[in-house]
Image: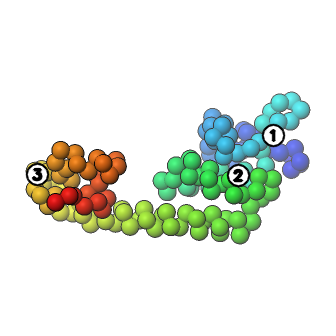
Amino acid sequence: MPASHGLSIGYLAERTGLAVSAIRYYEAQGLLEPWRNAGGQRRFHRADIRRLSFIMIAQKFGFTLPEIREQLQSLPNKRTPTKDDWSRLSAGFRTHLDARIATLEKLRDDLDGCIGCGCLSLPTCALYNAEDKAAKNGQGPRYLMGDRPET
């Protein structure tokens, strides 16, 4: 198929391993911008294979679709992204990934001392949250995530 005709959604699904419905969803979320041929069928750029692969990897790393969309908005839609484009994206994700890794390491290290204790009432327990005071700091196990209880 000539590149000027674009790729069909079925071919894109076959190449990426994604369901056609997932590709349509990503389109609806503004992550892809296909065009329509004379028959009204979606057509995609060859670069969209790489875009979808990036989306899948970023999701596995825990990034949300809005975060991924923000990064992808800096990429050109009409050409295959260059090595410099991808380097810029990866640099943008590096800080976020480093912070996530640090959080996971802290959780791993802190959980060694409390999983299985069963009491959840010791003043030193990072899970104990009397009267849900940590809620004002956000969702999740705030003390395990690095917040300090008020004394």
User: Residue at the location (70% across, 45% down)?
Assistant: 32
Q: CA distance from mark 3 to mark 2?
A: 52 Å
Q: Nearer the viewer, mark 3 or mark 2?
A: 3
User: Residue at the location (28% across, 47% down)?
Assistant: 135
On the image, the x and y values in percent for residue 107 come to 30, 61
Give the residue type that dot 2 points to.
Ile
Q: In the rendered structure, which disc, 2 or 1, sits on the residue that comes first in sequence?
A: 1
Residue tagged 3? 121
**Is the residue 94 above or below the residue 122 in the image?**
below
Q: In the rendered structure, which disc, 3 or 2, sits on the residue that comes first in sequence?
A: 2
On the image, the x and y values in percent for residue 99 come to 43, 65
Q: In the rendered structure, which disc, 1 or 3, sits on the residue that comes first in sequence?
A: 1
Give the residue type that dot 1 points to.
Trp
Give the residue type that dot 3 points to.
Ser
Residue tagged 2? 49
| 75 lies left or right of 94 | right
Residue 53 visible in the current orientation? no
On the image, the x and y values in percent for residue 38 come to 89, 32
Under tag 3, what secondary structure? loop
